[in-house]
Image (spheres, rainbow, N blue to C red):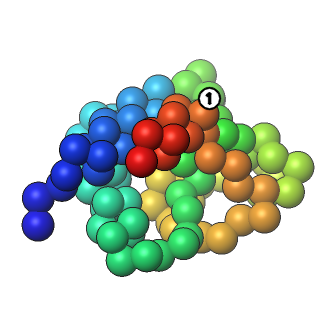
């Protein structure tokens, strides 16, 4: 079914977040679509790229977790951008929190 206004806003904020992390636009769009399906299914797993502690270093082209409770050191791109998981260090990015506050 088509996304409603709140879902479209959340998807747009996700794309902004993902592109700010260095994710190509096409992948950011696909990932936002996938997360919409996750939300609708009630899946509580998260993506590293949604987390405030997730960083992408464009110079070294590496993903990192800056949470004391998350992964230490560099992460594979697949883990940061594709693998849904439950992480004790997860903290929703402020960009995405704003979208959740409107719902």
Front position in the image: 40 or 56: 40
Front position in the image: 25 or 76: 25
32 relative position to 4: left or right: right
Rendering coords of residue 51 (x, y %):
62, 46
Q: Can you tell which quarter of the image residue 90 is in? A: bottom right
Front position in the image: 50 or 23: 50
Residue 64 seen: no
45 relative position to 11: left or right: right
Number of marks in picture: 1
Rendering coords of residue 50 (x, y %):
54, 48
Residue at the (11%, 58%) spot, across then down: 2
The crowd level at tag 1 (other Cα within 10 Å; few <14, some 14-19, many 20+) is: few
Mark 1 lies on a secondary structure that is strand
Q: In this view, does 13 lie above or below 20?
A: below
55 relative position to 21: left or right: right
Front position in the image: 91 or 65: 91
Residue 55 seen: yes
Residue bearing the label numbered 1: 57
Rendering coords of residue 14 (x, y %):
40, 41
- Identify the residue at the far top of this view: 59
Q: Can you tell which quarter of the image residue 46 is in? A: bottom right
Q: Is residue 34 above or below residue 32?
A: below
Q: Is residue 20 above or below residue 9?
A: above
């Amino acid at each position: 079914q088509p996304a409603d206004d709140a879902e479209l806003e959340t998807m747009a904020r996700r794309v902004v977040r993902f592109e700010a992390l260095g994710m190509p636009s096409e992948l950011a769009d696909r990932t936002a679509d996938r997360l919409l399906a996750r939300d609708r299914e009630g899946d509580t797993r998260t993506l590293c790229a949604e987390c405030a502690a997730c960083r992408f270093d464009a110079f070294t082209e590496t993903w990192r977790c800056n949470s004391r409770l998350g992964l230490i050191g560099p992460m594979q791109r697949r883990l940061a951008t594709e693998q849904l998981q439950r992480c004790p260090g997860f903290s929703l990015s402020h960009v995405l929190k704003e979208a959740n506050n409107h719902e």
